[in-house]
Structure formats: C-alpha cells, structure tokens
Image (cartoon, rainbow, N blue to C red):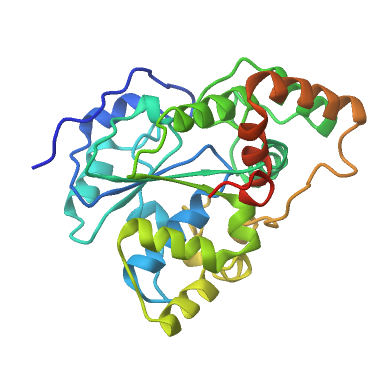
Amino acid sequence: MINAPTAPNAEYVDVLADSRLWKHFRPRADDIIIVTPPKSGTTWTQAIVALLLSGDPGFNASPSINSPWIDAAGDDIDEVFGQLEAQTQRRYIKTHTPLDGIPVWHELTYICVYRHPVDVYFSWRKHEMNMTFELDDLPIIEDPSEGFRDYLDSAYKGTAGARLPGLLNHYKCTLGEGNRPNVLRLHYADMTRDLAAEMARVADHLGVSHSPEVMASLVDAATFDNMKQNAARCAPAAGKGVWHRDDAFFDSASSNKWEGQLTEDDLTAYDAKISLALKTEERDWLEWGNARSGQV
C-alpha cells in the first residue's frame, strides 16, 4: 500500500506542459520519476535508467513510449495513461514540473538533474532550431546576446520553456526537499566528467546491481556519442517528424557554450541575477556540479 503523497502546492501550465494532469497518475511503489528543467539532461537520464533496469546495452530506449512525459500538454490523456498502466516492467516517467507542482510519495524514487544555466540557454536555442514547428510563446531571438537578456529578464516560469526564472525555481524546489532519501540530485557536468561514477550512484539509488563487465557495457552504451549515433532508439519522438534531424537532438554535450557568444555585459548581468537568487554554495553546485562545490 502506498501512503498519501505530499500534495502539490503550485500549478504549472504553459504551451507545452500542464501539471494538473498529475491528478490522473496512479503510482506504483517502485516507480521512478525523472524531474528536470528542460535541456538539463532529461533524455540522457532516461537512457541511463533504461539501461540500468534492463541490463542490456542494446536496449531500445524509445523514451516517448517507455518513459512518457505524462504532463505534456496536448497529448491524448487516455492514450498516454493507458500505455503507462499497461506497462508491466518497472516504470520511469519524465516531467519538467518542479517538485512543488507534482505529488511526492515516500515510496517512489525521484531523480533530479541540473546543468549550468548558461549552457541550458544555448542548448535550448539549438533545440528550438531543430524543431519542425514553432512555439509562439517562446520565440527564438536571432541574436544570441539579445536572446540571452530575454532569458535572464523573462518573467516566464513555465515548466517547458528554458528561461532562467523557471530553472531557478525548479532548482530551489529540489533544494527545499532537503535530504529526502528517495530524491537523488545529479549534475550534467558530473555525468560528462565521470559517467561511470554517476551511473553507479543512479544504480545504487534504484537498488539495482550488475557485474563489473555488464556495468562497463552499460556505461559505454550511455555515452553521449553512442546515444547520438543511435538517435533512432534514443531520441524522443524519433521518426515522428518532430525534429529536422533526430540525431541533432543530441547537440554536443559540451560546457562553456557562451565562449565567443556573449559579451562581458551579458555575463555581468547573469552574475547579478544568479548571485541574488542563490547562496554561494548553491550557485557553485548548479553551475559546476560536485567538482566545484565539493558536495556529493
């Protein structure tokens, strides 16, 4: 039996997501909820979880089917939740909604992933350019410096669009959960730096284990380059005409994307915003992960 969750105390509704759809969700005690801001490592984490649960480096991740975004606006609710209910394996579910906008059950497992906010901005730009449709509420501003100021100054706190206020709100909601044992916090930079170590942390959090030989093969399968080469089975909505190129969904997995793109004034404005919003240790971890912050 699953106990009552900590109920949401906020709603997030925008052009791409609607947190109210969580009212249709029927949890199972071993469910895994992947909770990330956009362009922070969502699909990568879904693939890692899929590989660890299956133990098969050739597993067809098909995240849109196997790991649905259940609060995506505009999807057929009956179809999405029907497919989810029909799954017999351990389920892993995606959401961009912050933890204060979804129910949090003690029995379920949560994984939250973050990335340097400036890298998120540039990754989102590439993401929108690769879409075969336009988002009216989130237009692409051609000049990266001008677009960056919009990213910083926007009041937009929706869950689907990458804007700094929404990202900071998402992060603070996770920090507000303190040291809940069922919530794991990962950083994109740590995953890039030492994927094997981060996958071991995820495996421990999920309560799964594999032989060293199998784990090595799973880590190799989860590398960014391998996922890009296998976009047909790793990219969300692959083959559905959502992207100009499915493999371009996986851009570069690089950091410091702002070099040569932003002015000193842009970076000074960012520094003022982030310093006002976060304590020094909180900022260090959000930007650089464990290597800079010394946290685990």
Which residue appears farthest toward the bottom when viewing the image?
213
Between residues 126 and 107, which one lies in front from this camera angle? 107
In the displayed orientation, state which residue is furthest to the left: 1
The image quadrant that residue 262 belongs to is: top right
Q: Is residue 86 left or right of residue 191?
A: left
77 shown above or below 43: above
User: Considering only vertical position in the picture, is 12 above or below 130?
Assistant: above
Q: Residue 153: image x %, image y %?
A: 71, 17
In this picture, residue 200 sits left or right of residue 65 = right
Task: Compare residues 249 and 180 and report the one nearer the observer.
Answer: 180
| Residue 275 x %, y % | 71, 23
Residue at figure coordinates x 71%, y 42% from the top left? 119
Quarter of the picture containing the N terminus is: top left
Q: Residue 59 appears in which quarter of the rendering? A: bottom left
Residue for point 41% across, 64% down: 61
In terms of depth relative to the viewer, which is nearer, 54 or 111?
111
Q: Residue at x 53, y 24 (%)?
A: 169
